[in-house]
Amino acid sequence: MRCIKIVRACRAVGLGLLLGALACGGKAEDDPRAAEPSYTAPRANPSSPPVSSPPVASATQPPQSVPPMNPPPRQPPGMRERPPVNLARAAAENVLMSNCGPCHGPSLTPAQAQDGINYINDIDKLVVNGLILPLNSADSRIIVLMRNGIEPPPSSGYPRMTDADIAVVADYIDNPRFWPILVPAPLEDAGTPTPTGDAGADGG
């Protein structure tokens, strides 16, 4: 029983010494070295270099012009629409060629063509030879023959020309826009003429 008490007393003394050593930093009395802490402080992470922000545009800097997203494509010169006079003339010549070309077309010689006319698709030649009277479709021979059903002739087997086809040719002939040289200039108002004689002082 006494031995157990002695052992307990020794344990209590040893525990007291251990606590005393820890309280003084773990340094023994006969150790000349400085006491060191029993733990190591964590190292701080190295600081990352500062991130440079993008430069801010000055308020006085003029704004840059921004080009349009989809600029309109340039139209090539060859793709432009032809003047209306050319379109109207082509339409009239096509009507004459499709209805009268088998007998008066350019593929025939004058001897082969009926009445020697093988230029039915050429407005200029029709005017020169008197078949078309500019600005006067009512008296133009080619219009008269078509309206009367003489051209194309019934014996040719070709159908009679429709009023719409005849109107295409007649409208071209009667339109002064297509014959500017033949349209007379408007007369200018010269005003009221003043008498040139001297009426005298008394107006008599």
Image: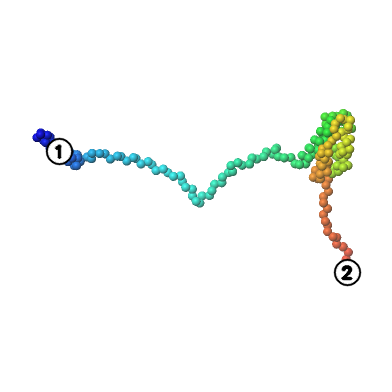
Q: In this view, does 160 lie to the left or right of 68?
A: right
Label 2: few (<14), some or many (≥20) within 10 Å? few
Residue at image position (38%, 42%) is 49
Q: Quadrant of residue 176?
A: top right
Mark 2 secondary-structure assignment: loop
Which residue, given by chain and number where applicable, does mark 1 sit on? 12
Q: Is residue 179 visible?
A: no
Residue most extreme to the bottom? 202
What label sits on residue 203 in the rendered view?
2
Q: In which quarter of the image is residue 105?
A: top right
The correct choice, above or below, for 107 with respect to 138 in the image is above
The correct choice, above or below, for 197 with respect to 58 in the image is below
- Comparing 69 with 24, the one in front is 24
Relative image position of residue 159 (x, y in whole percent): 85, 33
**Of pointers 2 and 1, the one earlier in the residue sequence:** 1
Colour mode of the rendering: rainbow
- Comparing 147 with 100, the one in front is 147
Query: Could you tell me how far apart the alpha carbons at marks 2 and 1 are, in whole angstroms?
Result: 163 Å
Residue most extreme to the right? 204
